Amino acid sequence: MTTKPRRAIQCVINLGNPLLAYTQGRHIQGISVDIANAWAQETAQDCALIVVQNAREAVELLEEKKADMGFVANDPARAKHLQFTKAYLHIDGCYLVRESSDIKTLTEVDSAQHRVVVGLGSAYDLFLSRHLKEAHIVKAASSDTVVDTLIKEQAQVAAGVKHQLEMDMRKHKGLRILPGHFMQIQQCLAIHQEAGEELLAAVQAFLNRYIQDGKLNSSMQKHKVSGAVIASTTN
C-alpha cells in the first residue's frame, strides 16, 4: 500500500524585518522560522518556507492563497482578506534622523518641511500614511533600504522598527534615533479569511502555549532580539 505523502504547510517568511528573520550562510533563521517549525511539528506537517524580501510581498502571497501562514503586522488595510491572531510581539516603530537635525521629538516630525522615508507596504508605511498630515512620505523599496534611501534622497527622517534602525546606525555614522516610539507594531500570525475561524482558533491556542511555555522568549534570546516585547496571552 502506497502511503500518501504529508502535505507541507506553506509559511511565508519576510526577510525585510531582521528582528523576525534573517539569513546566516545558506540558512534562514529567526523567530518566524522557529514558530513555523513548531506549528508544523504540532500539526504533523512538513514546513516549506517561502522567503520574500518585504512585508508587501508576504501579504500578497497570503491574500492570493499562495501561502498558508505568514508573520505580518495586524493592520486594517490587510483585514479585508486576512485574519490575524492576537499579537505575540509588540515592536517599537521609531524615527531616525541625522545627529545634526533640529528634530528632537516625535511631534516635530509631522511638518511640511520634512520628508519621511518608509518601507513600501510595511506596517509603519500603512500607519504613517494615515496619521501624518503635513510631512511628505517617501517610499523605499523595502524596510532594510529605508536608511540608505534617507541618505541618497537627503530626506529628513527615516521610520522603521527599532532593531533595523539600530543595525543601520552601525553601518552609517552621524545618525540618532528619536526618544520614544510613534507606534507599537502588533506582530501576528496571519491566515486567509477563507481558512476559517476554527483554524484561527487552533493557531491562537498553539501560539498561547508557545508563549506560556517560554519558547518565544528562548527564541528571542537565541536570535538576540531587541526592541520588542512579548505580548500577554491574557489580553
Image (cartoon, rainbow, N blue to C red):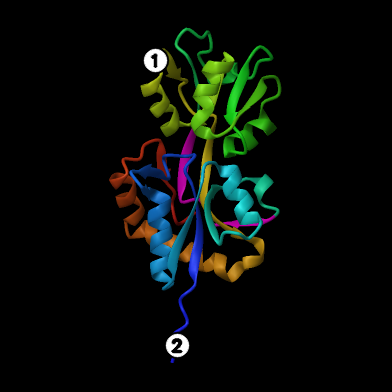
Image location (x, y in percent) of residue 135 = 67, 20
The residue under label 1 is 173
Q: Which quadrant is home to the N terminus?
A: bottom left
Image location (x, y in percent) of residue 196 = 63, 68
- Identified by mark 2, the residue type is Thr
Does 20 appear in magenta?
no
The residue under label 2 is 2
Image location (x, y in percent) of residue 130 = 69, 33
Which residue is drawn at the image coordinates 44% and 32% (left, top)? 164
Which residue is drawn at the image coordinates 47% and 7% (left, top)? 100
Left or right of residue 155: residue 37:
left
Frontmost residue, 154 versus 199: 154
- Identified by mark 1, the residue type is Lys
Find numbered disc 1 in the image and state the secondary structure of the residue it sits on: loop
Q: Earlier in the sequence, mark 2 or mark 1?
A: 2
The range drawn in magenta is: 81-93
Frontmost residue, 32 versus 22: 22
Is residue 179 among the parts visible in the rendering? yes
